[in-house]
Image (tube, rainbow, N blue to C red):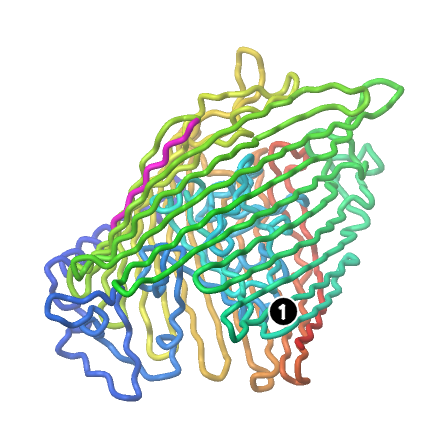
Amino acid sequence: METSGWKSVNRASRTARRLVMTIALFTVWGLPSPRVSLSETPPPTQTEATLDLPSESPLPNGSSAKQSASVTSVTDNTLFDEIPSVYGAAKYDQKVHEAPAAVTIITAEQIRKYGYRNFAQILDSVPGLFTSNDRNYGYLGIRGFNRPGDYTSRVLLLIDNHRMNDAIFDQGGAGTETPIDVDLIDRVEIIKGPGSSLYGTNALFGVVNVITKRGRDLKGSEVSGEASSFNTYRGRLSYGNKFSNGLEVLLSGSYSNSEGHRELFYPTFASTNNGITKYADRDNLYYYTGKLSYGDFTLMGGHQWRKKNVPTAAFGTLFNDNRQLTVDERTYLDLVYQHEFVNQLNVKARLYFDRYYYYSDLPYDSGISSPPSLLNKDVTESDWWGAELTVTKRLFDQHKLTVGTEYRDQFRLNQSNRDIDPPTTYLDDKRRSSFIAAYLQDEWAIMNHLVLVAGVRHDQYSTFGGTTNPRIGLVSTWGKTTVKLLYGQAFRAPNPYEQFYVTGTTFKANSNIKPEKIKTYELVVEQYLGNHLRALGSLYQYNISGLISQTTDPADGKLFYDNVDDITARGAEFTIEGKWPTGLEGRVSYAIQTTRNDQMEQMLTNSPQHLVKTNLIVPVVGDKLFAGFEGRYTSSRLTLAGNNASPFYILNLSLFSQRIVKGWELSAHINNLANQRYGYPGSGEHRQDIIDQDGRTFFVKLKYRF
């Protein structure tokens, strides 16, 4: 049976199809826009800025697409002058309205003024995105999809265009486990929609590309200190500069220690210590990163170690036993060569090495009087290296061609599980795998106001074989209006954890899993309103086939992973944002999505139907003191037990000051100002159906630059 929400989105989908047909007639026939004709467009004056089209390649008449496509001008000090660029949508820089995707950019300035202290807070501010947390890891949801226990494996996470999803679990990360210090972020690119035509696996729902600062952005040293709720203290020391000989360097180290909640109450465990666990929520980490550039070469890398105590007694462990913890260690090193030749040929090559190490201590009831408990240790060790070559070239005046190839050798994929005392080994699996891929994309300026983007990538794996994934998009810009018609396919390869993880009588392996695949159809409309406002709307539908899910073999009762689910989802997103020369800035967004498991004919778990977000930055004292307000409404989510996690509204308040005293910045933030009680659905390893989250929290931070 269809829900009323599904019917409303279905009607919107039919309306979108009619709109698509109308737009296609105007764009393909080359007719002027029914709203603004070319003859009505005034020429730009010396005090006006023009809106550029997606290509600067020469056109047959000898002019450039940029020159010929300027159809509407706007006054200075508007959003048009500050249209951000995005790299991750095409593997080269382009304006967000040119990109064949719905794109959101979160800047370093917004991160500072809203007081975001972790990656999840940044992602939660983005229209259509939502997060959850089980007091061990953070999880990112996008367009209604965030299955409990999914390690953000269906969104590709990049840091400076370097893939961060690990080689065992495909974990991208959305919490403190993400190896990044938010103070070092220059911008975050959120590119929605399938991205496998350029990036391969994991990019089912989108690509999140974190661009970090360069040495020139610091121009010296920075030191910062922070104190916040739950006896949390953080510190950072950074140095960056660009020297006269062209050498550019950035070095940074960060440390964080949080005691977490001293006590947490879980009614599920009322028979043990009255449901209270103590000193089991600690979170400790350190992070180092560096970036060195000279000429056409850049060497960058990072290392993070993080230990998190787990208070939820996940995986059937003993409650109120603070020995349960997880340790995640992530290291990467990336050497990049990039050169742009005089004939509009751009060559980019990279050679990289990655490591991911994980272990978990799991205390269990031994079932005997002596010893009353035993400690199980789960360990993952993985190392891989790879190389990629990307070439971009202008061809035949109207084409921008991107050709690339990538190879990755995952030469250590080790998983083990054993009891410490008495020593018993349940899993000792050692493997190696690799893949090679080739991709091609063409950006074709069919006419002044119409660009066709078409791309395809083929990946050949040593495990399951090959998969080919295309995408195609039409991008049409008329004056202040941009319309995008998009179609794409993407895949996620089965990972070693899903294929080969075994524990005693509970789990068994399945080496025959195939890639899960998605097809997405989307209409995006971007409209600039006046001189300071921008509106964006998106209608989409996606279909997932062969979703990898955990299931039970009726023959032996064991759990295993297989391609068992098909998913259909439809939704719409609407955003309006504004920015004024005074420093006033704001955004309001609404997202509605309806997701359905086709086999079970029911809505997906942990999938809110409505998301409403408001963001506002207000200058209080010129450019020296700002107030940031953020509101976030999330509708109810279905839990694994068939209950509903209640809807909630979170209000955050921040104050940010700069240049009051030379070199100093002071910021303060209150999260969940109204002390709203709320929770997220638990996953299969939890006995809690809903896991409560933090109430009101605060932080105060001081930074000095010298």
Q: Is residue 58 left or right of residue 154?
A: left
The part of the image, by quadrant, that contains residue 183 is bottom right
Which residue is rendered at x = 51% and y = 34% of the image? 410
Q: Is residue 331 left or right of residue 581?
A: right
Q: Position of residue 660 (x, y in %)?
A: 66, 85
The part of the image, by quadrant, that contains residue 69 is bottom left
Q: Nearer the viewer, residue 558 or 16?
A: 558
Residue 626 shows up from this direction: yes
Residue 384, relative to residue 505: is it above or below? below
| Callout 1 secondary element | strand
Task: Locate the C terminus and report the quarter of the image it occupies.
Answer: bottom right
Magenta residues, as a range?
A: 454-462
Task: Locate the N terminus and report the quarter of the image it occupies.
Answer: top left
Q: Nearer the viewer, residue 684 or 334?
A: 334
In reply to whether residue 456 is colored magenta, the answer given is yes
Residue lying at the far bottom of the rendered structure: 46
Residue 651 shows up from this direction: no
Which residue is rendered at x = 31% and y = 68% of the image? 527
Residue 409, relative to residue 425: is it above or below? below
Residue 11, relative to residue 698: is it above or below? above
The part of the image, by quadrant, that contains residue 51 is bottom left
Q: Amino acid at mark 1?
A: Leu
Which residue is rendered at x = 55% and y = 24% of the image? 500
Q: Is residue 489 left or right of residue 413?
A: left
Q: Nearer the viewer, residue 548 or 303?
A: 303
Which residue is rendered at x = 36% and y = 58% of the image? 92
Q: Is residue 198 left or right of residue 31?
A: right
Magenta-drawn stretch, dominant element (helix, strand or loop): strand
For label 1, count other residues whose C-alpha is less than 10 Å away and answer few (under 14), some (14-19) or many (20+). many
Q: Position of residue 108 (x, y in %)?
A: 54, 68
Which residue carries the number 1 mark? 653
In reply to whether residue 486 is colored magenta, the answer given is no
